[in-house]
Image (cartoon, helix red, strand yellow):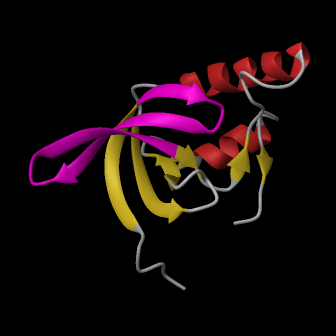
Amino acid sequence: MTDPHAYRYRGILVRAVDGDTIIVHLDMGLRVYTEVSLRIAGINAPELFRGTPEDRAKGAEARDFLARYEDKHVTLVTHKDRQSFNRYVADITLDETGEGLDDLMVMAGHAVRVAA
């Protein structure tokens, strides 16, 4: 079923904040652009600033892996997620390959799937 509150956008991944949050330069249409922080839907990556030193190191590895995709064009579908600190989450696909960032993070071992 299609979410009536979901929106589709194009953008450029500007920065990986951590292993499951990114900053995107978003094309809102009609020559309107903005930068937004989005959580990648469906995954959870290790934290950067909590847990043991080993956990934090894994968080840094996840962020660094995601940073490989900075400056890449992406297509995303956003959803408001009240369980994600009332932020927006998004299904994010690389335009170049059609791969989802969630799939790439999980396949590389830097994130785990979570229930939607």
- Relative placement, left or right, of 15 versus 81 is left
**x%, y% of residue 65?**
66, 24
- Is residue 62 visible from the viewing direction of this image? yes
- Relative placement, left or right, of 94 versus 65 is left
Measured along the vertical axis of the image, is residue 41 above or below residue 13? below
Q: Main secondary structure of the magenta part?
A: strand
**x%, y% of residue 33?**
19, 42
- Relative placement, left or right, of 54 versus 58 is right
User: What residue sits 14% from the left and 46% below the top?
Assistant: 32
- Relative placement, left or right, of 20 versus 54 is left
The residue nearer to you, when weighing 75 against 47, is 47
Residue 105 in the magenta stretch? The answer is no
Image quarter of the N terminus? bottom right
Residue 28 in the magenta stretch? The answer is yes
User: What residue sits 51% from the left and 50% below the top?
Assistant: 92
Circle count: 0
**x%, y% of residue 58?**
81, 22
The residue nearer to you, when weighing 109 against 85, is 85
User: What residue sits 70% from the left and 39% below the top?
Assistant: 105
Measured along the vertical axis of the image, is residue 116 above or below residue 104? below
**x%, y% of residue 34?**
24, 40
Most extreme residue toward the bottom is 1
Image quarter of the C terminus? bottom right
- Is residue 68 visible from the viewing direction of this image? no
Q: Quadrant of residue 36?
A: top left
Q: Which residues are magenta?
A: 14-38
The residue nearer to you, when weighing 67 against 55, is 55
Measured along the vertical axis of the image, is residue 25 above or below residue 3? above
